[in-house]
Amino acid sequence: MWIFQSPQQKFTIGKVILGGLPGENPTVLIGSIFYHNQKKIWLNTLDGIFNREEAEKLIKIQEEFADRTGLQSMLDVVIPSRKCIEKIIDFICSVTNSSILIDSPSVNIRIEALKYAGEIGVLEKCIYNSLNPESSELEINKVREIGVGSVILLAYNTKDLTSNGKIKAIKELIPKVKDLKILIDTCVIDIPSLGLALKAMLSLKSEYGYPVGCGAHNAIETWRGLKTKMGTQSIN
C-alpha cells in the first residue's frame, strides 16, 4: 500500500486522466513524433514537408499498443521550425483525438504553437512541454496568458545532477505556476540518471501530490552496444 505525505492530485487533459494513487488510473504512454532526426517521417524539416502516411502509421501503432496494454496515451509533438507549426498541428488533429504535448527546442516556436492551438480551439487538450529552472519569467507569463491549463516541469538541474538536484529544481519552479495543472518530468538523459529520476519521482509525488513521470527511453537511446546484444527490437 502506498502512503504519501500529500493528497494525490488528478488532472483531466482531453480524454486522459493523469495522477492519483498508483494503479488508480492507467499509466500514460507518451510517444515523441516529428523530432528533428526522425528520418522515417521528415522530407524537409525547414519547410514542414513530411510523409503523412508514415506519421499516421506511427500514431496508430502507439494507439494500438495503448489499447492492447490498457494504457492511456498522448503525443509529444516536437516542432522543429516555424513553418511546421500549422502543418503539424492540423495534421495531428486530423488523424487522432489524442492529447498533445507542445514541444520544440525553441521557446519561441513552443509559444507560437501554443497560440495556434488556441486559435483552432484545441488548447484544452494541450500541455506545454516544458518549463525548467532556466525558463524566463517572460516565457512563464506567455504560457499563462495564452491560457493552456497544464505545464510540464522538467527537473533539469545543470549544477546538480543528483536526485536532490532534481527535487530542488522542481521546488524552485512550483511556486511560479501553482495556478496551473502541474505535471513533473524528472529528466532522464542517460542510463545513470534513470535511477536518480525514479528516486526523485517518488519523493516529489509524495511531497506535492502532482502526477509524475520521466522519459525512461532516453536511457536506452544512450546504451552503447544494446542493439548488438539484444537486436533491433530493443531500440525500435
Image: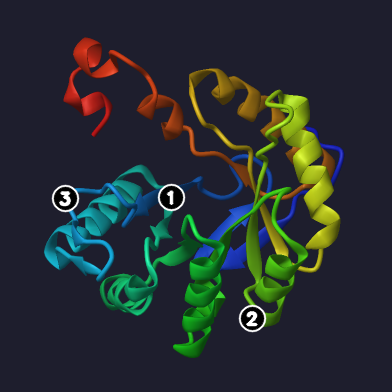
Q: Is residue 218 left or right of residue 133?
A: left
Q: CA distance from mark 1 to mark 2?
A: 24 Å
Q: CA distance from mark 1 to mark 3?
A: 19 Å
Q: Nearer the viewer, residue 140 or 30?
A: 140
Q: Nearer the viewer, mark 1 or mark 3?
A: 3
- Residue visible at 31% across and 57% down in the picture: 34
Q: Is residue 171 left or right of residue 123?
A: right
- Mark count: 3
- Residue visible at 46% across and 59% down in the picture: 104
| Mark 1 burial class by Cα count in 10 Å: few <14, some 14-19, many 20+ | some
- Secondary structure found at label 1: strand
Residue 236 higher or lower than 78, as above or below: above
**Looking at the image, is mark 2 or mark 3 earlier in the sequence?**
3
**Looking at numbered disc 1 in the image, what kind of residue is underneath it?**
Ile
Residue 48, picture quadrant: bottom left
- Secondary structure found at label 3: loop
Residue 135, picture quadrant: bottom right
Q: Is residue 7 visible?
A: no
Q: Nearer the viewer, residue 202 or 87?
A: 87
- Does the CB distance between marks 2 and 3 fall below 8 Å? no
**Looking at numbered disc 3 in the image, what kind of residue is underneath it?**
Lys
Q: Nearer the viewer, mark 1 or mark 2?
A: 2
Q: Quadrant of the C terminus?
A: top left
Q: Is residue 142 visible?
A: yes
Return the mark for residue 40: 3
Q: Is residue 176 left or right of residue 148?
A: right
Return the mark for residue 49: none
Return the mark for residue 30: 1
Residue 220, picture quadrant: top left
Name the residue tied to disc 2. Answer: 146
- Residue visible at 37% across and 72% down in the picture: 97
